Image (cartoon, rainbow, N blue to C red):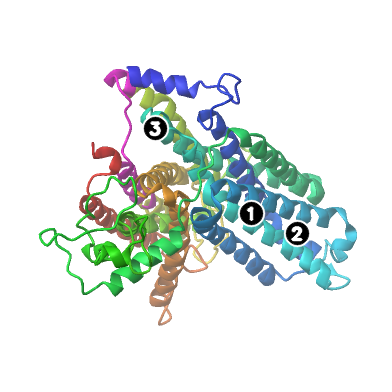
Amino acid sequence: MENFSEMESVMEEPLLSKKSSNAKGGFRTLPFIIANEAFERLASLGLMPNMILYLTREYGMQTAGATNFLLLWSAVSNFTPFIGAVLADSYVGRYSMIAFGSVASLLGMILLWITTLIPLSKPLCNQLTDSCDNSPTALQVLILHSSFALMSIGAGGIRSSSLAFGVDQLSKRDKDAGIQESYFSWYYASVSMSSLIGLTVVVYIQDYMGWTVGFGVPAILMLIATLSFFLASPFYVMAEVKRNMLSGLAQVLVASYKNRFLQSSTENGTYYHQEKGSDLVMPTENLRFLNKACIVRNPSQDLTPEGRARNPWNLCTMEQVEDLKALVKVVPIWSTGIMMGVNMSQGSFLVLEASSMDRHITSNFEIPAGSFVSFMIVSLVLWVVIYDRILVPVASKIRGYPVKIGAKKKIGIGLFTSCISIASLAIVESIRRKIAIEQGYSDKAEAVVKMSALWLLPRQILNGLAESLTVIGQSEFFLTELPSSMSSLASTLSGLGLSVASLVASLILSVVDRVTGGGGHESWVSSNINKGHYDTYYSLICALCLLNSVYFLYCSKSYGPCKDRRK
């Protein structure tokens, strides 16, 4: 019970209190860090849905050109966090990266807002006909592109380091009290909730109050978030970059190749180079060929009088070698999250199904087809609340010490839940298609069948549960297993997996369409949802997800116990 009471006392610490004004970090700094990314997500996602209308109506872009522009923006915004993570871990540090990203995002949103305030910043267009009197000038195009570029750069700075920067604020006492796990959960819950608000409230403001107010609200929110982040600067723990992570990993690869003919054995008295004050005595036995990078052949020639390597590209420390091993070791576990992302990427098909079903809650209220994604976000947030505020406290009181689900168990349960979610969608689609054919709608893709769209909710609820378990579990796993010098990189690995998942999902879709649609046959993923076989396509995804779950079990067993279990 003592540890559980300790957790409660840490959670009750007031924000920026005078009592601990001289202390750095702690739970009190986390709301400022979480709010900063939450507002950035709210603003950027709130701009996305209606941006196609803004570009076509206010800039006279063609639909295809505007769509490609937005796809490029989305791709860049998802990739810049990876670059930001490498820069933060290797050069500038996490605080500087978030600060730079916050200012860049703010400037980008203000610049986009200016295009609604100053008429000369965009061409004169007729919104009713989507036609413009003249094409955008070079300056107008530059302003538009600069605003999106700044927002993408800002996303890379904020999203790459926020999660890891929050972990930097936690002491060992906080982590032992379960604050770190709670932080992961509430971080993703807050970001998801802000995404939901962005996709609903901000979009509503744009629809009914115009572009000026609709773009002004995200800019003002980003200003508040940026100011609050800087306000808490005196209280942050700002970990310094001890060494260049990127060059350090490269040095291990180069040195191990150069020393590939050396023999390493404990019997012949092999001497390994280590950092001063290091607890490592010998490098681990896995990936043994990398151990050759830290073998000292001749101490007088290889080392300086201070004990440092004369040429770090010929001789590395054991710590550098173990860092690279840790990164390589988590790759199989990381790869298991790709199929989870493939499942999540089926959302556009869900909209097609919802649009062909009865979405009425009452005779006067109908749920928009595109709003069904919100049920998944609500499910994710509810699970975090139930797990963190009910299940964990109750279980901890019963057991007398902090209780939690391990990171790998979270991932495994999440992946299996993802299989059930796509299976439920396959069953619902099979029934919907059968009803559509019976009602004579085979050739009417836009017809609404007499089946409630609420049957799609089990899939969305299960998806929310699966995502909360898998993504939070992955982040906890990567941040725990990788060294602290890679924390920013660790926090972006899940996002990188989702980016790869989008490519894999596109590949699977293309192959299925080409194979099943050949020879005059109707493709499983036909434009006519009633003629296609989306239920069979979902079954294929489900089978791949089940195979992926088995693959995860193998990877998990091969990996061995996590660091927090090696006690």
Question: Do labels 2 and 1 touch, CB within 8 Å?
Answer: no
Quick one: label 2 or label 1, which is nearer the N terminus?
2
Q: Position of residue 65 (x, y in %)?
A: 68, 71
92 relative position to 231: left or right: left
- Name the amino acid type tagged 2: Tyr
Quadrant of res 455? top left
Residue 16 rendering spot, x and y as whole percentages? 60, 26
State whether residue 302 appears in this view. yes
Look at label 3 and name its amino acid: Lys
Q: From this viewpoint, is residue 364 visible? A: no
| Image location of residue 254, percent across then percent down | 35, 71
Which corner quadrant holds the C terminus? top left
Classify mark 2: residues with Cα within 10 Å, few (<14), some (14-19) or many (20+): some
Quarter of the image where one finds residue 272: bottom left
How far across and how far down the image is residue 47, in percent?
Answer: 68, 52
> Which residue does the numbered mark 3 point to in the structure image?
172
Mark whose residue sits in front, 3 or 1? 3
Chain part drawn in magenta:
396-422
Q: Is residue 276 above or below residue 433?
A: above
Q: Which residue is mark 1?
A: 154
Residue at label 2? 54
Label 2 residue SS = helix
Q: Earlier in the sequence, mark 2 or mark 3?
A: 2
Q: Residue furthest bottom?
A: 519
Q: Is residue 333 magenta?
A: no
**Of labels 2 and 1, the one closer to you:** 1
* Cα gap from disc 2 to disc 3, whole angstroms: 49 Å
Q: Quadrant of the N terminus?
A: top left
From the image, give the main secondary structure of the stretch colored magenta: helix
